[in-house]
Amino acid sequence: MSDIAIVGLGAMGAALARTLIKAGRDVTVWNRSLEKMQPLVAMGAHAASNFIEALKASSRIIVCLPDYDSTAELFEQPDVLPLLAGRTIIQLSTATPKEAVISEKWFNDQGASYLDGAILCWPGNIGTPSGQIAVAGPDTVFADCQTDLEHLAGDLRNLGANIRAPATIDLAFLSRTVGIIFGSIHGALICEAEGVPVSEFTAILPAGDRAVPLTQAINDGSFDTITAAGASVDIAGSAVTRMQQQALDAGINSELPDLLCDWVKRAQAAGYGSQETAAVIKVIRRSD
């Protein structure tokens, strides 16, 4: 059997797999788009021909999918359920705290051990000292997976038994990030309204700040280009929708995510979903 199997090979899942292969771990990979496995196979990974084969390949499974609905779609298949007992699921997909609680109970009910985690860095940071991953779950389960997790992130944080903690920290940090993004879009709008070049706003921002490529895109009108540090309107929409759902789940004020969701939906309706998040400015330039 492999030391570990990785399900989901988007940019982040592939970075996780590459890092573990380079660390000398025996890794099995699987992705619905089979071509995404080939570069990892060339590095030494085993390619599973289907999800069940990936599940059988190891007692430890890292799941890195877009959301928990995607995870449920795979694991709740009738022919998968008998294979879960005795396995450890390390869930690194994007979630809300409530989803993490539901997921832990479901996997435990199937006889599987469970860690819930949040990746708090970019794919390029995986396997480096700046890589950040937060996980939660039983101490014994964490201890069993600790070596592999430490390969993935120089800054690995065990948040204890509270399974809500990683998704909570992820959302808290996300709130800060989208505050910078959407606040900077409004800042550019202020400049436009007062006849000041947006490039003057960019010039006072710290080097490496997320708002730099954002405001440059607005100044240049280059909304079709998404830099390595950027994200599309659709990706931003997924983020603020999670913030909105958490507010509803927890019964806290949702006015901020409500506003941002409205901006994003208007941009998507205008056909800007695949453009840089900065494109939101195009639908808020008028007050109506």
Image (cartoon, helix red, strand yellow):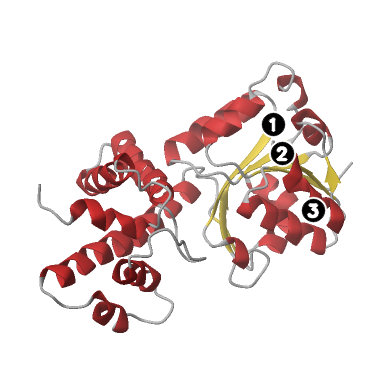
Q: Quadrant of the N terminus?
A: top right
Task: Give the image quarter of residue 204.
Answer: bottom left
Residue 140 percent across, percent down from the top left: 69, 46
Q: Secondary structure at mark 3?
A: helix
Quick check: 141 above or below 202? above
Residue 134 percent across, percent down from the top left: 55, 56
Side (left or right) of 73 relative to 264: right
Q: Secondary structure at mark 1?
A: loop
Q: Give the residue pinned by disc 2.
A: 88
Question: CB atoms at circles 3 and 2 under 8 Å apart?
Answer: no
Q: Give the residue pinned by disc 3.
A: 40
Question: CB atoms at circles 1 and 3 under 8 Å apart?
Answer: no
Q: Amino acid at mark 3?
A: Leu
Q: Give the residue pinned by disc 1.
A: 112
In this orientation, which residue lies closer to the viewer: 171 or 263?
Answer: 263
Residue 246 percent across, percent down from the top left: 35, 40
In this orientation, which residue lies closer to the viewer: 166 or 231?
Answer: 231
Q: CA distance from mark 1 to mark 2?
A: 6 Å
Task: Give the image quarter of residue 253.
Answer: top left
Side (left or right) of 221 relative to 161: left
What is the crowding at mark 2: few (fewer than 14 residues within 10 Å), some, or many (at least 20)? many
Report the label total: 3
Residue 11 percent across, percent down from the top left: 62, 54
Task: Give the foreground label among 3 and 2.
Answer: 3
Side (left or right) of 260 relative to 18: left
Earlier along the polypeptide chain: callout 1 or callout 3?
3
Residue lying at 48% horizontally and 65% vertically, measured from the top left: 227
Residue lying at 21% horizontally and 78% vertically, measured from the top left: 197
In this orientation, which residue lies closer to the viewer: 5 or 275?
Answer: 275
Q: Amino acid at mark 2?
A: Thr
Task: Give the image quarter of residue 209.
Answer: bottom left
